[in-house]
Image (spheres, grey):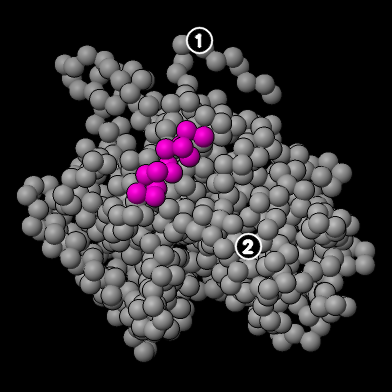
Amino acid sequence: MAGSPRPSGSIMTNNSSFQIAQQDMLFALHVVGTPTDTRTMLADLIGPAARLAEAELLPLDPIADRVGARYADGQVVMPPGFVQFYRQWVEGGWNNVDVPEDWGGLGLPVSVAAPLMEAWTSACMAFGLAPVLTQGAMEVLLEHGDDALRKRWMGPLVAGTCMATMALTEPGAGSDLNLIRTRAERGDDGQYRLFGQKIFITYGEHDLTDNILHLVLARLPDAPIGSKGLSLFLVPKWLLGEGDRPGQRNDVQCLGIEHKLGLHGSPTCTMAFGEGEGAIGWIIGREHQGLACMFTMMNRARLATGLQAVAVAERATQAALSYARQRCQGSPQRGMPPGPIIAHPDVRRMLTDMRARTMVIRLIAYKAALAIDSAHGAAEGAERQAAQQRASLLTPIVKAFCSDSAIAVTSTAIQVHGGAGYVEETGVAQYWRDVRITAIYEGTNGIQAIDLVQRKIVQAGGTALMTLIDELRSDAAMAAAAVTPLLRDCAPLLTGALDAIIQSVGWLLAEQRSEGERLAAATPFLDMLGRTLGGALLLRAACLEPDPATPADIGFLAASFCWTHLAAVPASARLVCQGDHLLPPLSAWA
């Protein structure tokens, strides 16, 4: 049923008013301790990137949402403007900023690549997904591929004439990779032939590039049972011919694309491998060691998911602020004249929380990016091990806490818009629809919480977490010595939250603790750790000597977040320590 015409004079969200948050990006890098030369690199690049994103990519976002990717006869046609922008983006060299210089990239740190990824995703998340898996595939090839594979495929990937996918999920194997049934058979000349079907494959088919590389998890006939029997294969859409140009079509087909809640411009494909003689592929790494190789790509994708959350939260926050400044409705208090809704205290409360949460998740994501850089640059031995443990600890927090926070921010943006937020014409509903997937893909947030508790804390004895907590205590001391009471009053909140984390860790590590108790506590524990880390970083940001990029309202943002989110952490700790005692037994659900 067609919608009725919109009354004249109604306020619509103006996407053209959005600006990439350049100063907030530079400020966040400063807060997390990124080296000065790294911040200078970003300062040189973010301006041109922002101009390109705002002028050329941002206008494509509503078109991508409205038109979407289209499937017909095994082919996927991208939304209008995507192919042209992709070519422009590649010509500018933006697709290989963190690829090593030896392979034709700029060799920039992840701390620089992360804000740039945020910029593209802020302008259009559907496009921002496209390069993520290609960058991850290059990292997998460089770390696990043999010389022949690297020499053959790194060139097209770096040149942008080829993109990549991560093909894990199957109709019967989602989060549980033990259930993967796609099979691989050994062939001649080191080749393998693959047979099976994969679903939910992001950018599995498209017309941005002629060729697409699929990194596919499959099982050899003599493989051990479970995930330890999985191998990773590189399976191109087109086999390379003369001059490394696409030659013969491989036995790989797209059977269709999903009709999704959001991200309509990003094709999510069902892929068939080997419906004929088998899809030809080459193994990456060793047989039966595929999952270890794939985790290189998955961890990069989890950082990217956190950055997607930051990007869309920023977009939603700017839209809500712009609307609240324009929309006039009622008097904020008795005796005052009617004015814009930003004058209403409750609206300002929502906007302040949106701004604070967006800044917090940016700080957390950039801190993780810095940890990855530190791990890459550290000397062998204890220094590198500590850096790798820090990056590993932060990864599930970035993926889960940032995405949960962004979903909340985009929901609040709809609330700020009132009834106008619930209709598609304003565009604000798209932010929630697009970002909702970030809590689901690349490992659901519940799985991230289990990974944090079981692997990063229980199995590791909590060592990396205790080191992080010691660091955050210095932020509490800094707040306690602050000049303004607004910040000094937050110091006990941070100290209380840190004590609650230690109490919860002690409970998790207790010998008598059952696995079921730990699993039930995992999600609330990750949430309280994310809030504590975020609150500490935001307090640090408010207490540092002012920087040219320091937001004018940073003190209010820090205090608001601490009183709204940090103050609740001790209560969350009590919930964690209840374990599974609050859950009805399984028999009650029969």
- Name the image quarter holding residue 366: bottom left
**Residue at x 67%, y 21% (from the top left corner):** 2
Total marks in image: 2
Image-based side of 41 in relation to 81, left or right: left
Relative to residue 118, is residue 501 depicted above or below? Answer: below
Image coords of residue 126 (percent x, y): 60, 43
- Residue at 71% x, 43% y is 208
- Which is nearer the eye, 325 or 95? 95
Q: What is the x, y in percent for residue 168?
A: 68, 65
Which residue is the site of mark 2?
137
Q: CA distance from mark 1 to mark 2?
A: 50 Å
- Disc 1 crowd rating (10 Å Cα; few below 14, some 14-19, many 20+) is few
Q: Is residue 291 above or below residue 46?
A: below
Q: Tag 1: residue type? A: Ser
Which residue has dot 1 on it?
8
Q: Position of residue 263 (x, y in %)?
A: 61, 43
Q: Quadrant of the N terminus?
A: top right
Q: Main secondary structure of the magenta part?
A: helix
